[in-house]
Image (cartoon, rainbow, N blue to C red):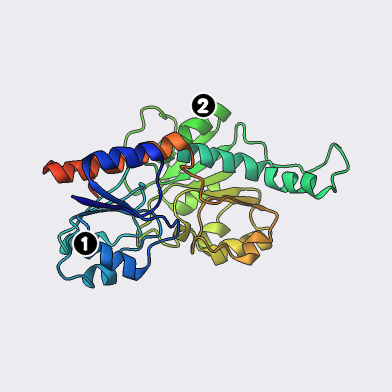
Amino acid sequence: MKLLITRPLPKPVLEAARQGFDVSVRQSTDPMSEAEMTEALATQDIILPTLGDRFSADILSAVPAPRTRLLANFGVGYNHIDTGAARAAGIAVTNTPGAVTDATADIALTLMLMSARRAAEGERLVRSGQWRGWHPTQMLGLHLSGKVLGVIGMGRIGQAIAKRAHFGFGMAVVYHTRTPRPLPVLPDARALPSLHEVMAAADIVVVAAPATPETRHMIDAAALDAMQPHAHLVNIARGDIIDEAALIAALQQGRIGGAGLDVYENEPEVPEALRNLDNVVLLPHLGTAALEVRVEMGLMALENAIAHRDGRALPNPV
C-alpha cells in the first residue's frame, strides 16, 4: 500500500514505515496545501497527516472517488480533520491517544510554574542586562503549593495534570468535564456543576478539553471574568477553546494574574498584542516535543495503518 507521511518524522518511525509500505515523505514542515491534500487523496492508500493539515469537508468532497481509505493522524487532537465528511467519503480516521499524555501534562506543569512564578519575565530581565540583583520584593509571584487547581476536561491528560499537581504540590483539585468518570487515583477531586464555578474556585485553571465545535471559545469573556484576580490560566489543549481576544483584554487590564499558552487560536500566528504582554508565557506548541514521545506517536499511527492494511480492527478509531 502507498503511504504518505506529510511531515518529516523521527528516523525510527520512517524505518518502521518502510518495512510495511511504499512510503513517500513530504519534506516540508509547513501544513499541506489544498492541492497537495487533494492529490494525496487521489493517489495514496493511507495518509499520515498531522496538525495543520486541514482535511475539511471541501477538500474531501473535491475528490469524489478517493484512493485513500485511512487518515492515520499523528497526534491525539484531530480537529483539523472533518471526521463526518471523511466517513461519508469512506475514509476512516485514527489518532494517537496515550502516547502524548505524560509529555503534555509535563508541559502543563511547566506553564503553571512559569506563569505563577514569572519565570519567563525573569529570564527576559536577566538577558536584557537590566537585573540589579536580588531584593525581598522583586518579582513576587504566586506560590503553587496548597493552592486550588481547576481542570477543564478530565480525560487522560487532565487526570495526569491533576495527579502531578495534587501529589507534587499538595494542590486541591476541582474540575468540570462533559463526561463524568470515576477518579480512583484522585478521590478528593471535586467535580463542580459548571465551568464558571471551576473558574471562580481555582488559583490555577488548566484547559485540557478536546477541541470540538461545542468547546470553541468555551473560555470566553464571561468565563475569564469569573476567575479570581490573582488566578492564572494555562492552555495545553487547542487554541480556539479560548477566545483569544477576550484573553488579551483580560491580561491587558490585569483582571487575571497571568496565563501560560502552548497553543493559539490561529496557530502559528500569535497576535502582537499577546506577544507584547509580560504577564503571559508563550511556548511554540511544545506539548509532545520529546524524541521518545514523537517516536511513540509515530509508531502508534503506524499501528493503525498496519491494522488497516491487514484488514483488522483499527486500534484507535475516532
**Residue drawn 57% across the image and 44% down it:** 204
Q: Position of residue 24 (x, y in %)?
A: 30, 52
The residue that mark 1 highlights is 43
Is residue 249 in view?
Answer: no
Q: Position of residue 46 (x, y in %)?
A: 23, 53
Q: Position of residue 291 (x, y in %)?
A: 46, 37
**Mark 1 neighbour density, 10 Å: few (under 14) some (14–19) many (20 or more):** some
Helix, strand or loop at label 1? It is helix
Of residues 241 and 257, the one nearer the viewer is 241
**Residue drawn 31% across the image and 50% down it:** 73
The residue that mark 2 highlights is 167
Q: Tell me which corner region of the image, top left, top right, bottom left or bottom right, holds residue 148.
A: top right
Q: What is the CA distance from the residue labelled 2 to the residue labelled 1?
A: 50 Å
Q: Nearer the viewer, mark 2 or mark 1?
A: 1
Q: Tell me which corner region of the image, top left, top right, bottom left or bottom right, holds residue 113.
A: top right
Of residues 290 and 44, the one nearer the viewer is 44
Please state if 244 lies on the left or on the right of 10 as rendered. Answer: right
Q: Position of residue 110 (x, y in %)?
A: 57, 39
Please state if 202 lies on the left or on the right of 300 as rendered. Answer: right
Q: Hey, what amino acid is under mark 1?
A: Thr
**Picture layout, residue 90 above or below residue 23:** below
What is the residue that sits farthest to the right in this orientation?
A: 132
Is residue 9 in view?
Answer: yes
Q: Hey, what amino acid is under mark 2?
A: Phe
**Residue drawn 77% across the image and 46% down it:** 127
Please report whichever mark, 2 or 1, sits nearer to the chain's N-terminal start.
1
Helix, strand or loop at label 2? It is helix
**Residue drawn 81% across the image and 42% down it:** 138
**Picture layout, residue 214 above or below residue 131:** below
**Mark 2 neighbour density, 10 Å: few (under 14) some (14–19) many (20 or more):** few
Q: Tell me which corner region of the image, top left, top right, bottom left or bottom right, holds residue 175.
A: top left
